[in-house]
Image (cartoon, rainbow, N blue to C red):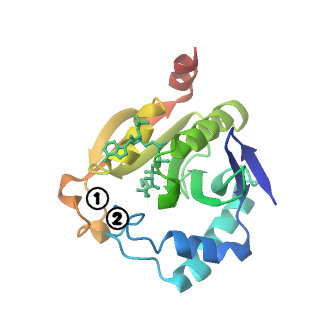
Amino acid sequence: MDMYLETERLSLRRFTAADAELLIELDSDPAVMRYLTGGEATAPETVRERHLPYIIAGYEKWDGELGLFAAHERDGGAFVGWFCLRPETDGPREEAELGYRLRQASWGRGYATEGSQALLHKGFTGLGLRMAWAATMTVNHSSRRVMEKLGMTFVDTAPVPPDMGRVEGAEHGGVRYEITKEQWERARI
Ligand SMILES: CC(C)(COP(=O)(O)OP(=O)(O)OC[C@H]1O[C@@H](n2cnc3c(N)ncnc32)[C@H](O)[C@@H]1OP(=O)(O)O)[C@@H](O)C(=O)NCCC(=O)NCCS
């Protein structure tokens, strides 16, 4: 297993080409996809032919240090979902998007906060990050709550992308949160 980091309860590892089924199953739960596609599953061929190759290509681009990582429970190894800490394709390496998508069975146990806290710690102390940002739909309250618990600050609203126009709550738009290295350091004192 190509380990990336460990928290108290989670192991994060790099994805491999053998992980398509995990991602297909994760994206086939309408509750998981509620605020992403309106509940629609990602087509298996899209996962196999686009998403997974893109994830793996990202490890090459960012030396295996930034990207999307599979999360498992340390106790028993169950797949929990994924976390990402990833610069925009043509953006500066010092600014990365924080994201998470967890299996419904793993919600409500503090995992999203725990994994994200570890990623921010690694990003700000070991990877030269200056700022991390996260975005979600205005109505995705659990995701926003995670951002708030991480000490991130609401900075902006924006319309949701056109392909999400029919998702429940799209009329309320999206929100962006940020945290700089300095803010993160101050919050830890
Ligand atoms: C968003 C998501 C990652 C949260 O994962 P999680 O492991 O349950 O998150 P945590 O347990 O760390 O924290 C969730 C917080 O949201 C709160 N919450 C949950 N549902 C809520 C709601 N409807 N309204 C307000 N707060 C809510 C929880 O009470 C908790 O806060 P607390 O610790 O103060 O009680 C998970 O629900 C998920 O993967 N959803 C599907 C994919 C998704 O929407 N990803 C984000 C897209 S940007």
Q: Position of residue 53 (x, y in %)?
A: 65, 74
Residue drawn at x 52%, y 46% is 112
Q: Earlier in the sequence, mark 1 or mark 2?
A: 2
- Asked if residue 87 is positioned above or below residue 45 in the image, the reply reads above
Q: Residue furthest top?
A: 189
Question: Secondary structure beneath disc 1?
Answer: loop
**x and y, in percent, of residue 85 in the image:** 59, 48
Mark 1 vs mark 2, foreground winner is 2
The circle drawn on residue 34 is 2
Left or right, residue 55 beside residue 155: right
Quarter of the image that includes the C terminus: top right
Seen as rendered, the residue at the extreme right is 1
Beta carbon of the mark 2 residue lies under 8 A of ligand 1: yes
Count neighbours of disc 1 (C-alpha within 10 A) and say few if under 14, some if 14 to 19, many if 20 or more: many
Q: Which residue is more in the foreground, 67 or 36?
A: 36
User: Residue 127, located in which quarter of the rendered image?
Assistant: top right
Disc 1 + disc 2, Cβ < 8 Å: no
Q: Amino acid at mark 2?
A: Arg
Task: State the SS at label 2.
Answer: loop
According to the image, label 1 marks what residue?
Answer: 160
Residue 66 at x, y = what percent?
A: 66, 51
The reply, left or right, for residue 70 in relation to residue 28 is right
